[in-house]
């Protein structure tokens, strides 16, 4: 049974600052503080602004993924990004509740979309998207419920990783896992499809998006001309990320291959012709969390590496006034911890 746990405790998190050697940036211009480190594995955050609060959601568990199936999703909020107040905890007995992504619905409430599944012997035997809605104040969240689909979609092992709202409609990329035996070995592949929703609970397919290479985690954004941009992680083939672009009604696409792999990809528009992409950054056998300033086709103009290493990434991004706020996780201090970074927008200039 899915349970909701409520807390009145306000957390006071020390504002410890870190310095780090960044690519093309002075180390002391980035301020990083801890948000949460209570569980053995604290990971996969998202960040959003709603009314007078900043909200961060993340997964708590014993490890990245495993047969324990004990993952929970917590939501905390703060007015000053220092004192974090827990508002919800999504917990399911004997099932793994995986990372949430937050969005603001057209009716002025928050929505958290999560995945709930069971892992056995390194593979999912069940996986489905669930959603929870807040009240108008963003203080109380509903019991998460399973999403439903139009008849052309057959639920199997599915995950809607993020929903983005535009002109009253929510759009998200749902990816589906398939396991096949190849040369005596079990191999996982994935395919993705674009979906739309009016209420966050019921989804229909938008045909036309076709990406190879086992596409999965994807973030959608819209420019001022209603053009849709989709940033997609790929797991097979050359594994390079893809930035897909389409005009309304979003059924004819241009695909831009990136020069980097992605993990937990997120992005925002810096201005009319530049993006800020946050993702896991692979450097040989090492991995960290990085921010890439790119053009509108995903060509990297500048890279900033955040204090991070190992199991890390999944940045939430907010652009506000002259600052970029980032929530991410990293294991460079011994275990995976939720951090927030503040980066002056002037440090994202590229001299174009």
Image (cartoon, rainbow, N blue to C red):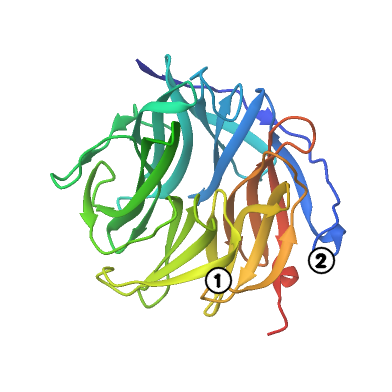
Q: Residue at x 35, y 49 (%)?
A: 191
Confirm or deny contact between disc 1 and disc 2 (CB under 8 A). Answer: no
Res. 135 visible in picture: no
Q: Residue at x 39, y 45 (%)?
A: 190
Between the residue at mark 1 and the residue at mark 2, the CA separation in whole angstroms equals 20 Å
Q: Quadrant of residue 189?
A: top left
Q: Is residue 78 left or right of residue 49?
A: right
| Label 2, residues with CA under 10 Å away: few <14, some 14-19, many ≥20 | some
**Where does the image place residue 23, in percent across and percent down from the top left?**
79, 64
In the picture shown, does residue 322 fall above or below 143? Answer: below
Nearer the observer, 72 or 282: 282
Q: Residue at x 36, y 52 (%)?
A: 173
**Quadrant, the N terminus:** top left
Q: Is residue 182 left or right of residue 292?
A: left
Query: Disc 2 designates what residue?
Result: 25
**Quadrant, the C terminus:** bottom right
Query: Disc 1 designates what residue?
Result: 298
Nearer the observer, 131 or 287: 287
From the image, state whether disc 1 or disc 2 is nearer to you: 1
Q: Quadrant of residue 294?
A: bottom right
Q: Is residue 30 left or right of residue 188?
A: right
**Where does the image place residue 259, in percent across and percent down from the top left?**
60, 66
């Amino acid at each position: 049974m899915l349970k909701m746990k409520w807390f009145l405790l306000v957390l006071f998190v020390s504002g410890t600052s870190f310095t780090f050697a960044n690519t093309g940036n002075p180390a002391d211009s980035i301020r990083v503080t801890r948000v949460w480190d209570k569980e053995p594995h604290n990971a996969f955050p998202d960040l959003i602004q709603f009314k007078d609060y900043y909200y961060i959601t993340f997964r708590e568990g014993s490890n990245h993924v495993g047969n324990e199936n004990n993952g929970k999703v917590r939501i905390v909020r703060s007015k000053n990004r220092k004192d974090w107040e827990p508002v919800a905890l999504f917990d399911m007995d004997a099932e793994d509740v995986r990372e949430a992504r937050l969005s603001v619905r057209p009716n002025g409430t928050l929505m958290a979309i999560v995945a709930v599944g069971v892992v056995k012997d390194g593979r999912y035997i069940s996986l489905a998207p669930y959603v929870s809605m807040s009240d108008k104040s963003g203080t109380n969240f509903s019991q998460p419920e399973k999403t439903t689909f139009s008849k052309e979609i057959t639920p199997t092992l599915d995950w809607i990783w993020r929903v983005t709202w535009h002109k009253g409609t929510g759009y998200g990329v749902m990816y589906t896992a398939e396991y096949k035996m190849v040369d005596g070995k079990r191999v996982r592949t994935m395919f993705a499809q674009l979906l739309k929703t009016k209420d966050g609970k019921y989804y229909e397919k938008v045909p036309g998006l076709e990406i190879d290479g086992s596409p999965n985690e994807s973030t959608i954004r819209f420019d001022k001309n209603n053009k849709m941009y989709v940033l997609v992680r790929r797991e097979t083939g050359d594994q390079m990320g893809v930035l897909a672009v389409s005009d309304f009604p979003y059924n004819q696409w241009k695909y831009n291959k990136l020069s980097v792999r992605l993990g937990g990809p997120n992005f925002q528009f810096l201005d009319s012709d530049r993006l800020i992409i946050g993702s896991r950054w692979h450097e040989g056998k090492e991995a960290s969390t990085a921010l890439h300033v790119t053009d509108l086709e995903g060509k990297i103009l500048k890279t900033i590496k955040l204090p991070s290493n190992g199991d890390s990434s999944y940045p939430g991004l907010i652009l506000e006034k002259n600052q970029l706020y980032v929530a991410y996780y990293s294991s460079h201090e011994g275990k995976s911890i939720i951090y927030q970074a503040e980066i002056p927008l002037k440090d994202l200039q590229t001299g174009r």
